[in-house]
Amino acid sequence: MRTNWQRAKELAILLVGLGVIGVVVLVTGVFPVKASSGHWPITAWILDFASDRSVDFHSAGIEPPPLDEPGMIRLGAASYEANCRWCHGRPGLPVPRVPAEMTPSPPYLPTATFHQTPRELFYIIKHGIKFAGMPAWPSRQRDDEIWPLVAFLKSFQDMDDATYLDHIKVGMEIDSATTQLVADACASCHGADGHGRAGDRVPVIAGQNREYLERTLEAFKTGQRHSGIMEPIAARLEAEEIRKLADYFSTQPEHRSDGDSALGSKLASDSELGDPASKPAATPPSDLDQAQKRLYELGETLANHGDGPSKIASCVECHGPSPIDRSAEYPRLEGQPAYYLRHQLHLFAKQNRGGTENADLMHPIADKLSDEQIDALALYYSR
């Protein structure tokens, strides 16, 4: 009968032998790593199973927001068109030829059935998948940008070609290289006129300061301002294209044809204003309830007078509206969506927004703002 020592010796010899074989395979290169042969069925099953279990484990605790927010699916469709369809395909077009030869090949999503929950899709989009060619989201700081894509994917299998095209294409007259660039790179989210067509997560850029738009696009291009949506788009733009886009949107009318205002919604022009410190308080819009009116009045006070005890400067000194000659490198805020303004201030407070060198000026201010003050400023400037 073999002793325990003999069994241990035999096991050690076996392990050493397997190790030697592994080293030989590794050093000689005899094992093929070519993608053309694909995975063995058992290998594919193990990788898929391990991936599914890992995603389920690590996504536990993620709480999805409501996915039926107006414009959310359209914004997700635009993100998909810009970043994802090159590997995963789009309705009405065949499976992309080159990605189809990857191992593993990316799934053709227009006909795929999603078994993943929203939290699992969020985790996959944010972090990617190792050994699968699935990249992580370009910006780790912008979880908010991922949820529209999740909302889009959950509705994808029920979406026909016409609906998809309606989300990503804008009917506009193409009469120059600039308008073609707008149609290709900007209009699906911002609209042809810069007033937006993908909900309140998208800023109004019609009539915005040209210098601000140009420098912002440059910051997106270099990764100084964080956005998984805008960074890839801006990275493909040449310097001259950035200048043309800034010129185009800065000269778009601030008012829509229906009379609704975007930028400059409160007052006709800065030149009509007196000293913000002596200006009478704005009258809250009549459609607000009492709680919202109080919030609006707080926002009006902060915007025009700041908060002396907290050392918070007034917003109008840099962002208007006021008679002060402000730098065109600062954005105008009046008429921006409340959601967008609120979220930008939270990003500043967390130092997750990035931007040009001027962005550093906002951190000491945003750090001191309470959630109520942020909501108040967002409401005031949006109305």
Image (tube, helix red, strand yellow):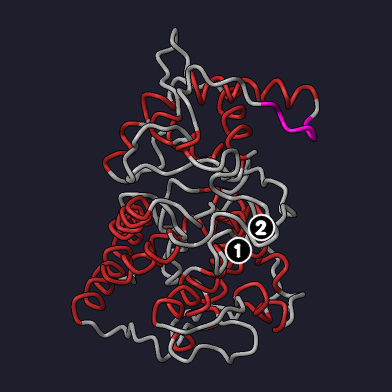
Residue at x-position 31% and y-position 53%: 215
Res 111 visible: yes
Q: Nearer the viewer, residue 50 or 227?
A: 227
Q: Residues within 10 Å of mark 2 (few under 14, many from 20)?
A: many
In magenta segment, residue 204: no
The span picked out in magenta is: 283-288
Determine whether, in the image, residue 68 is placed left or right of residue 47. right
Q: Which residue is mark 2?
A: 72
Residue at x-position 71% and y-position 53%: 67
Q: Nearer the viewer, residue 257 or 22?
A: 257
Instruction: Please state the horizontal and vertical placement of residue 104, each as a whole percent of the image.
Output: 48, 79
Q: Residues within 10 Å of mark 1 (few under 14, many from 20)?
A: many
Residue 162 occupies quadrant: bottom right
Task: Kindly identify which numbered label has been placed on residue 76.
Answer: 1
Q: Are marks 1 and 2 in contact (CB under 8 Å)?
A: yes
Determine whether, in the image, residue 220 is placed left or right of residue 334. left
Res 346 visible: no
For the N terminus, give its image quadrant: bottom left
Vertical side of 301 occupied by 41: above or below:
below
Residue at x-position 63% and y-position 60%: 198
For badge 1, the amino acid type reads: Gly
Instruction: Please state the horizontal and vertical placement of residue 192, each as a whole percent of the image.
Output: 55, 69
Determine whether, in the image, residue 360 is placed left or right of residue 1. left
Q: Nearer the viewer, residue 61 or 225?
A: 225
Return the residue found at the far left.
27
Vertical side of 161 occupied by 322: above or below:
above
Residue 89 occupies quadrant: bottom right
For badge 2, the amino acid type reads: Met
Most common secondary structure along the magenta stretch: loop
